[in-house]
Image: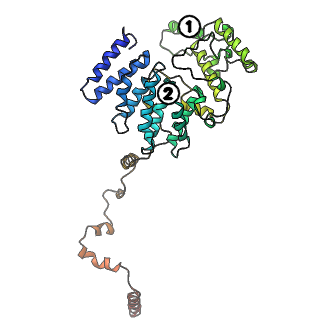
Amino acid sequence: MHRCCNFLGFTEKLYKKLEKCSEQFETKLLYMDLLSRLIGIHKLLVLNFYPYVQRFLQPHQREVTKILLYAAQSAHEMVPPDASQALVKTIADNFIAERNSTEVIAVGMNSIREICARCPFAMTSDLIQDLAQYRKYRNKNVMSAAKSLVQLYRHIDPNMLRRRDRGRPAVGAEDLKLAEFGEVRAANYIEGAEVLPSDEDDVEDDADGWESASNASDDSGDGEWVDVPKSDDEAEGTTGYINPEVEALSPEAKKEKAAAVSSARFFSQKEFDIIRKKKIADIMGTNKGSKRSAVEAGLDKEPGQFVSLSDIERLSKRPKETRADKIAGSRVAREDRGAFGKPKPKMNPHASTTNKQKARGKNFMMIRQKVRGKQKRSFRDKQISFRNALVKQLKSK
């Protein structure tokens, strides 16, 4: 997928085959999966693919969650707003409605969040304000999905939200503004680099540890394990790179320090992760539950090349079990338990049975007198029986 010579030509030929495909629906899904991955990875413009996907975006459609996943995979920031907004509008109209179940609404909201995380231009201010009202929905799955979408746009462009949905202003949130489509914002420094030390020697080099471990394994040759010591950054998290004196600097001084650090040396991938986490911490502020909100909105990780199906079908609350699920669960629970209602085995298998067990196998005419005697008697019958017993007792004397 990464080594193709002509990505755009191959994708257009593949889409023409998809349009004329008369195979089974599973084959069409494979075509759509490959197309969406190519479009998303290489940021290609195949605008006819989005109206084609919209035809299948119905809650009753078979494998609709996979189709929503393909739509999210094919979204990127180079897609024109007309195409991406039409896709999001179709999902909102067909899935996010009161006539649908709560699971359908939550899946539609999660799909819109994944699309907007890759293509922020797909959302309009009117639509995000309407979807933000589901934050107080009666179902927890819908409520958490709406909160994650609102939290995403607090990080991207808070001005699209209503004032009450923007949350408490935090450090750096006032500078957030979504760029226009096609706008390039060139910078001469890496934003947020001021949290890193200016000297590369201050950062511990992990290559020495790997070199020593590899040499030790080559010398031993007996197949034994080699203990590699953990670095300070792995033990203490990201505190080893962050300079506490940066918090006291003014915004202009932070920009100057970031420019100086950016031009001084190359950054490792771990340092880029630290910069991104520090940005999120500044934007989220110190509000209660900010860490959980960042995880729900997907801000704790960068959008990958592929979308996971669990991100589309994510439900915060376990759905109600059907009758078949309950029966299956009860059968699993009875596997390690003895059969209910069966008699306990005898201690001596050669022992005889009791009179009660023998009576069960007898004919009813043989035991009807005993059964009749056990029936509830009237007070008069008890009197007669008690009198006869006393008379019999006196005669015996």
> Residue 387 appears in which quarter of the rendering?
bottom left
Left or right for 377, reference 217: left
Viewer can see residue 282: no
Question: Label 2: which residue?
Answer: 116
Viewer-side residue, 313 vs 170: 170
Left or right for 151, reference 242: left
Q: Position of residue 16 (x, y in %)?
A: 29, 19
Q: Position of residue 134 (x, y in %)?
A: 53, 41
Residue occupying the point 44% across, 16% down = 43
For mark 1, give the secondary structure: helix
Quarter in which the N terminus is drawn: top left
Disc 1 crowd rating (10 Å Cα; few below 14, some 14-19, many 20+) is: few
Q: Position of residue 223 (x, y in %)?
A: 47, 13
Q: Position of residue 361 (x, y in %)?
A: 26, 67
Question: For the residue marked with disc 1, what is the amino acid?
Answer: Glu
Question: Label 1: which residue?
Answer: 211
Residue occupying the point 68% across, 15% down = 194
